Image (cartoon, rainbow, N blue to C red):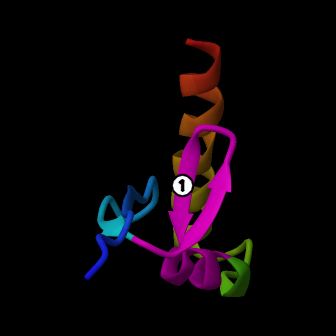
Amino acid sequence: MYEVDTQHCIICGQEKADGIRIITGFVCEGCEAEMVRTDVKDDKYLFFVHQLKQIWIQKNA
């Protein structure tokens, strides 16, 4: 049996195997799907923007 490689999602904070890598960050499939369905007027949209900004902060630190 093989070991599944998991990564820490920058949105939900959980360890997941499937998702997308954005520079040094990782977004799981579930969060990615939720982000693309979220309207810009939704309160959760600002949360997603804030979490994604962390990628740029980490990169420039």
Left or right placement of residue 12 versus residue 34 in this view: left
Q: Amino acid at mark 1?
A: Phe
Left or right placement of residue 34 versus residue 23 in this view: left
Q: Is residue 33 above or below residue 46?
A: below
Q: Which residues are magenta?
A: 17-35
Q: What SS does tag 1 mark?
A: strand
Quadrant the N terminus occupies: bottom left
Mark 1 burial class by Cα count in 10 Å: few <14, some 14-19, many 20+ = many
Q: Measuring 37% from the left and 65% from the top, which residue is drawn there?
A: 12
> Where does the image place residue 48, in percent across and percent down from the top left?
57, 60
Left or right placement of residue 51 versus residue 21 in this view: left
Magenta stretch contains residue 38: no
Q: Measuring 50% from the left and 83% from the top, which residue is drawn there?
A: 30
Q: Measuring 63% from the left and 75% from the top, which residue is drawn there?
A: 35
> Where does the image place residue 56, in percent across and percent down from the top left?
66, 30
Query: Depth check: 12 or 17 in front?
Result: 17
The residue under label 1 is 26
Magenta stretch contains residue 24: yes
Query: Depth check: 17 or 30 in front?
Result: 17
Quadrant the C terminus occupies: top right
Query: Depth check: 46 or 29 in front?
Result: 29
> Where does the image place residue 47, in percent across and percent down from the top left?
51, 58
Total number of numbered discs in the rendering = 1
Q: Measuring 69% from the left and 40% from the top, which residue is drawn there?
A: 23
Q: Is residue 14 above or below residue 38?
A: above
Quarter of the rendering containing residue 17 = bottom left
